[in-house]
Image: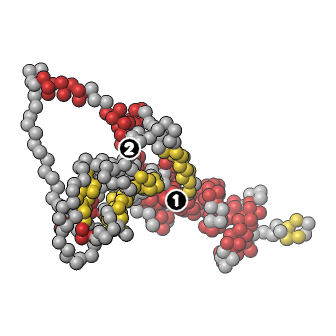
């Protein structure tokens, strides 16, 4: 079933669990997928869920244990707190953060608050740790401070004026590159290969990037959402055209139905250029929908008596799925009806291939029996 509100990941992200330097946490590790980021670190043996306070906000995360801050700072991206979870496993805290946008995070978090000395542990309540932080345990977010208005004119404070000038000269790409390259060396280059579903991607990891590469990453990150929306819109359009074609074919309007099917095929063929960027799930969905559109187009062409169009569209299906039963039968029917040189032999070959897949297909058996005998040297073939 195809729906008009696909939520498919156009570009996949897969980062295996790896360490990340967080002040105060020696064993912090993180991993990420297209739509989630996961954090792992020890909180100590004997710690129970009620000893923890986990505050998840769209752009920040704070974790306290017995009043001591373990993790506090801005996240590497925006999350959906209501869809994010945490659990305590053998003294290790596992957080699964649902990304608000399907994109790659360059870093998991920036620790901005130093860990404090242990305070008084919260009173025990006897309640077990929830798998998801409850709203009642979430502390209110800090309120932003209102800064006084600053004068950027030449007559203002020379200190402020110099500060503004320094900010105007600030190299944002250079600063991002410094953060991105922290802890990396020219010799620490890794390569990850991902393959499946007809696609493959080779990704270099842990290498030092220059400012141009960082700027390109930023631009690609901004364009990911737009690309995903475009691809999903194409899928939704093709699915709707298929539904329209089915209705028209049922209503006895094969010509209009054929036009809808071919229009839907055109919408999906435009995705071929972006195929390498698509996830295996999106590639599979696209291929299945394209197969249905072409198989149904063959049926509409048969209704119109357009044997050439029926053979062409059914052949396109069989090139991708050689055992597609409907395409085999429809191409055989078109060959049998066209009755040109070699058509009967081609129809017979398709029907025999179909009967190997579906031995009890009565329609295929009847059509095969109706074809003229094909004999060579008196031996039935």
| Residue 148 or residue 48, whichever sits in front | 48
Question: Badge 1, how many Cα within 10 Å: few under 14, some, many 20+?
Answer: some
Question: Badge 2, how many Cα within 10 Å: few under 14, some, many 20+?
Answer: some
Q: Mark 1 or mark 2, which is nearer to you?
A: 2
Quick check: 233 left or right of 169? right
Q: Secondary structure at mark 2?
A: helix
The location of residue 304, given as percent across then percent down, is 57, 60
Of callouts 1 and 2, the N-terminal one: 2
Look at 47% across and 44% down and name the residue there: 206
**Outermost residue toward the top in this view:** 154
Distance CA(mark 1)–CA(mark 2)? 24 Å
Look at 47% across and 38% down and name the residue there: 185
Q: How many marks?
A: 2
| Residue 152 or residue 183, whichever sits in front | 183
Residue 167 visible in the picture? yes
The location of residue 361, given as percent across then percent down, is 65, 76
Residue 109 visible in the picture? no
The residue singled out by tag 2 in the image is 221
Q: Are marks 1 and 2 in contact (CB under 8 Å)?
A: no
Which quarter shows the N terminus? bottom left
| Residue 38 or residue 316, whichever sits in front | 38
Q: Secondary structure at mark 1?
A: helix
Give the numbered dot on residue 117.
none
Which corner quadrant of the image does residue 335 belong to? bottom right
Give the numbered dot on residue 284.
1
Is the residue 181 above or below the residue 337 in the image?
A: above
**Outermost residue toward the right in this view:** 377
The location of residue 377, given as percent across then percent down, is 91, 66
Look at 21% across and 60% down and name the residue there: 118
Which quarter shows the C terminus? bottom right
Quick check: 212 left or right of 190? left
The location of residue 179, given as percent across then percent down, is 36, 40
């Amino acid at each position: 079933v195809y729906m008009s509100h696909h939520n498919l990941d156009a570009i996949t992200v897969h980062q295996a669990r790896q360490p990340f330097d967080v002040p105060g946490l020696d064993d912090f590790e993180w991993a990420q997928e297209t739509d989630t980021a996961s954090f792992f670190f020890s909180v100590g043996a004997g710690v129970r869920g009620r000893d923890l306070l986990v505050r998840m906000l769209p752009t920040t995360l704070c974790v306290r244990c017995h009043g001591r801050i373990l993790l506090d700072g801005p996240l590497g991206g925006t999350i959906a707190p209501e869809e994010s979870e945490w659990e305590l496993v053998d003294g290790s805290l596992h957080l699964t953060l649902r990304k608000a946008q399907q994109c790659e995070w360059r870093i998991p978090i920036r620790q901005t608050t130093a860990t404090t000395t242990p305070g008084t542990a919260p009173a025990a309540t006897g309640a077990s740790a929830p798998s998801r932080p409850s709203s009642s345990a979430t502390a209110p977010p800090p309120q932003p401070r209102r800064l006084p208005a600053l004068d950027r004119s030449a007559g203002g404070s020379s200190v402020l004026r110099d500060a503004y000038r320094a900010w105007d000269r600030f190299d944002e790409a250079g600063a991002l590159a410094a953060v991105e390259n922290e802890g990396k060396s020219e010799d620490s280059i890794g390569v990850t290969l991902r393959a499946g579903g007809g696609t493959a991607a080779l990704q270099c990891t842990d290498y030092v990037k220059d400012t141009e590469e960082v700027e390109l990453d930023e631009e690609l990150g901004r364009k990911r959402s737009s690309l995903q929306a475009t691809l999903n819109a194409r899928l939704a359009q093709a699915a709707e055209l298929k539904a329209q074609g089915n209705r028209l074919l049922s209503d006895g309007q094969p010509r209009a139905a054929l036009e809808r099917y071919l229009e839907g095929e055109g919408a999906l063929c435009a995705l071929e250029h972006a195929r390498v960027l698509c996830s295996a799930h999106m590639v599979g969905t696209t291929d299945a929908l394209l197969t249905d559109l072409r198989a149904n187009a063959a049926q509409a062409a048969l209704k119109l008596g357009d044997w050439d169009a029926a053979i062409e569209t059914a052949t396109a299906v069989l090139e991708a799925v050689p055992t597609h039963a409907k395409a085999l039968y429809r191409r055989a029917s078109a060959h049998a009806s066209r009755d040109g040189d070699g058509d009967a032999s081609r129809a017979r070959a398709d029907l025999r291939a179909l009967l190997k897949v579906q031995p009890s297909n009565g329609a295929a058996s009847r059509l095969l029996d109706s074809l003229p005998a094909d004999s060579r040297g008196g031996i039935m073939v």
